[in-house]
Each structure stands twice: as C-alpha cells, then as structure tokens.
Image: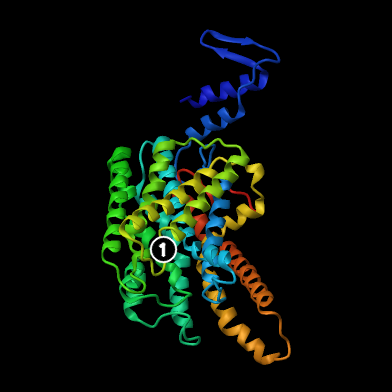
Amino acid sequence: MLRHCDLTRERRIYDLGFKWTDVGFRWRKGTYRRPREWMVEQESQMRVGPGTTSSTAYYRPELDALRFFAFMCVFSFHRMDYVPTDPLHHPWLFRIGTIGPFGVPVFFLLSAFLITELLLRERERTGRIHIKAFYIRRILRIWPLYFVAFFGLALLNHFVPGVGTADPLAWLAFTFFGGNWYILYHGWIAGSVDPLWSISVEEQFYIVIPVLAAFAGRKAVAIVSYLLLALAYLTVLLYALHPTSGDNGEWTNSFVQFQFFSAGTLIALLLRGRLVRLSIPMRVLGFLLGFSCWFTALLRFKVQSWEPHPTPVGALLGWLLVLTGAVIFFLSSLGTPSRFIPRWLAYLGRISYGLYIVHSLIFFLTFEKAVPYLRRLFPGLALPTTIRDHVWTLIVLMLSIAIASLSFHYFERPFLRLKKRFTFVAAREEVAPSI
C-alpha cells in the first residue's frame, strides 16, 4: 500500500504524464496513463472503516432485476388465491402460478450469495469480518418493515377481520423469527401475514453462517453448506417416506429451504468475485432451461409448495430440479452488462422487499373488500370475468409498487442511511443510483 506522500507524488506524476520508476521517473508523452480507478482504489485503502464508500463497493443491477423476477413469480402464485384459475381451461396459466412459489428459493439463493460475497470482500479489505456490524446492518435492513408489517396487520385485524392474527402464540413465534415453524405446526394464518414466514427462515440461517465465516474461515463455511444441503435432502426424503393428506408443512421447513442458502453461499465461495461471461442469447436460453427444470419438477415429480405428494425418488429429483432451476436463473443473470438492465427494472428490484411484504395485503383488500363493494355500488357495471380479473390484478401490482416505493423512500431509507455507518463494503442501496 502506498503512503500518503507516495500517493500524492503518484497523483502529481500522473497529472504531468510522467512514469515513476525505481530509479526516478521518465517522460513518456502520449503513451502513459495511470488508470484513474487505480488512484481511487489506493485512496480507498487509506481510509478503511465503516461508512466509507470506494471502488471496492459491490453492486450488480442485474441481481436487482433477478430479485424483481423472483417477486413476480411469487405474485403470480398469490394471485391464484383471489382469482380462481381453471387448470382445464387455462392449463399453462395455472402451471405458471403453481411454480410461482419457487421464486422464494431464488430470493434465498440470491440473499446468501450477496451476503457471503460482501463478507468475503470485507475480510479482504479490512482483514477480518465484523460480526457486530453485520448483525446491526441486518437488523436495520430487515426488522423495521418486518415488525411494522406484522404487528400492523395484527392491529388492523381488529377492524378488518382476516387480515392478521389475534393468536398470542403467533405473535411470539413471529417476534422471535419462528413464524415458519408456527405455520408448519398450526397451518397458514392469513394471506397478508403468510409471506413473512420466509423472513424467519432467513434470520435463522444468518445466526450461524457469518460467525463461521469470521472465526472458522471459508473452508468451514463450505463444509457446513454441504452438510446443510445433505440435511435438506434427508428431510425431503423423510417427508416423502411418511406422506400425509393435505399440506404437510414441508414448504416452510427451514431444513428444506436451507439448501438454497447453501447453494448461494457455495456459489460465492467458488466464483471468488468472478462474473459469469455469457452472451445475451445464452442467458435467455438459460432462463428457458430454468423454467424447464421447474415445470419438470411440478409436472413429472409432483413437487410444489402446497400439498406436495411425490414418491421418494420423485421428491429427491424434483427438489433437485427446483434447486437447479434457481441456480441457472442466478448464473444466467450474474454478469449481464448493465446496459441491458433498464433503470426502472433495477429500481423495482431494489424495492422488492417492500413489494414482497405488502402485495398480499393489497390482494386481500382489493379482491375481498374493494371489488365486492364496487359491485354493490355499481350493479349495472359489469366486465367480462377474464378482463375484470386482469384489470384488478394490474391495479394490485401498481398499488403494490406505489406503496413499496413510498415505504422505501420515506420509511426504509432512513434506516439504510444509518446502516451505512456500519458498512465496510457498500452494496445496492449505498451505491445504486436512484431512478
């Protein structure tokens, strides 16, 4: 690393067009240019600490685009809770909605990859991983909106029954991020609350992995990730060997979902900061292959998020295809040149946390409250069912985007500014441009 005086000398020589050597400097007019990125990097190394931003920042807009893709998968599934889709008359629309929950594994894989990548870069930049700072960042990013949403829905449930839960045990479970286990044993709560189960799974995974990365190193993280992968498929096999009627809770079981976190962690360890270099046609082909994996898991092996009843072999192969599809979607996205990612698409990915939290509530209020009210108010105003459902679905999406955008800018962003004080490698909100 250069001392400050060396850096000043280097800047001065760079500006004059000289090249510094061990025995002095010599003039190379028109041929020598020290890359300005190198200068920024040297300056950044002189001020390592929380809250600083530098060329070591890590932001990939294509991963925000992938995040919005994952949200739209989930959105298409939750739409079927309010817009009945006949599998006989609309078979592919029904199938697309049925594989929609597989967007959640994409969220999990993407989250694990990014956190592992950032932790590794933090170690390279500062020499260690700051555990306390990691958990503070995690709390500031996830907890405010999560708790406001859950307990806000519990309060709203007194005025709009069915929108939240009045069960104190559910309050306790979701407060301590055990909501997925509550659902596993007690069943789904309400459409507006149910998506929060995935936040519980994420927080459970991140209790251990950052500590391992800090104190045991890359090898230990890789070993634990492989063990969690094996445990996931052992759990899948046990479910298949002991079938039950109806929903068996497999979808919200942490040990089943940990396979996607493990995959994201291992990808970060294996790539070591490298990007995937593919042409755009190959990336499109990758997405088609990813969908093929998901549809095969559903149609051939009967793996799905609700009432899954595959054979033992079908369960193992089906879940492996779900995982493979998520990995292919991720690798087909990583490294896409930013010129191919519209700014509006990256922005929608940046607010996807808010979209994920609020969209089920908007679905409920629209289709369960607003639509019946408007039918009573305007009995003579009728649209064909298909057109009406598409129009209201679009309204739900637009309202979700509007509310998530307001939440991001006026509720989440103050916490993100505070989060920067504990950030050693800036990512996404810290470096991404506003739309």
List the residue tagged with mark 1.
198
Q: Position of residue 128 (x, y in %)?
A: 35, 39
Disc 1 marks which amino acid? Ser
In the depicted structure, whether residue 434 falls above or below residue 4: below
- Left or right, 37 with respect to 174, comes to right
Residue at screen point 43% across, 76% down: 151
Give the number of callouts: 1
Q: Nearest the camera: 20 or 249?
A: 249
Residue at screen point 30% across, 39% down: 217
The quarter of the image holding the C terminus is bottom right
Q: Nearest the camera: 228 or 426?
A: 228
**Under tag 1, what secondary structure?**
helix
Q: Nearest the camera: 73 or 35?
A: 73
Q: Position of residue 120 (x, y in %)?
A: 40, 40
Q: Nearest the camera: 353 or 75?
A: 75
Q: Position of residue 337 (x, y in %)?
A: 62, 40
Q: Quadrant of residue 206?
A: bottom left
